[in-house]
Amino acid sequence: MINVIPFEALGRMDIGWLDAHYHFSFADYYDPARMGFGPLRVWNDDRILPGGAFPMHPHRDFEIITYVRRGAVTHEDSMGNKGGTAAGDVQVMSAGTGIVHAEQNAGDEDLELFQIWVEPSQNGLTPRWETRTFEPQAGRLVTLASGRGDGGDALHIHQDVALMAAYLDAGQSVVHRLEAGRGAYLVPTRGAIEVNGTPAAPRSGIAVTGEDTLTIHATNDAEIVLMDLCPAASDG
């Protein structure tokens, strides 16, 4: 089954410097039917204006993945980590037993990113932060973050999920096979796509269950981000 949630139907908070769209219940947006998808608990589509910042604030027991689509985000945390993650880069923060961090758009262009929270396979892990650059690949899904043990150079996360991305030229397709009992959640960052023939507009959310193969076809030039996971379980 393929369920498409249009971008216009997502939750939203616009406070000027931050324009956020929520795929699942978050902050002041609450929908009991949209509480997550298995261990995937948060998928936020954020636009942050230059100078916009999340000041120091705590997290605990989440695997937090940031996929930067435009601009760059600067990071600082209570472990002494400082760094930047630019468009095409991915950062992972394991909040574990507790971490305090701040993030800011210190650049002169809008920052656009996905922030994705995954429940870990166990609580009380050691906090950590990593960032990495991934080369764009046309027509091929590249694994960005994974806890499945088969992600190659992917950033490690503590859960049985894999986050992937691909660029597709207009008319191009990519195929992803799902093991029995697994599903997927994917978002076309830009460009319209079809998933097994079901159309989806840019920045919509697509929840997939009960399918063994996904054929993702680009109606026009597109970028997709996909998470492969067990939709019915919150642990690995």
Image: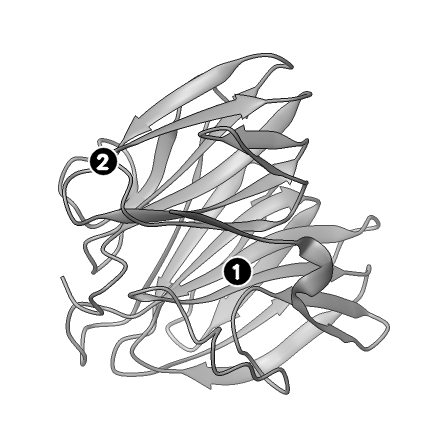
Q: Is residue 12 left or right of residue 231?
A: right
User: Is 209 drawn above or below residue 171 in the view shown?
Assistant: below
Q: Is residue 185 left or right of residue 76?
A: left
Q: Residue at x 69, y 21 (%)?
A: 220
Pointer 1: what residue? 115
From what the image shows, is residue 126 above or below residue 60?
above
Q: Is residue 46 left or right of residue 207?
A: right
Q: Residue at x 63, y 42 (%)?
A: 69
- Which residue is tagged 2? 151
- Horizontal and vertical percent for residue 72? 66, 48
SS for dot 1 = strand
Residue that appears at 65% across and 65% down: 10
Q: Nearer the viewer, residue 143 or 231?
A: 231
Which quadrant of the structure image shows residue 56? Answer: bottom right
Amino acid at the residue labelled 1: Gln
Q: Which mark is residue 31?
A: none
Whether residue 211 sits left or right of residue 46 in the image: it is left
- Residue nearest the observer in this picture, 20 or 30: 30
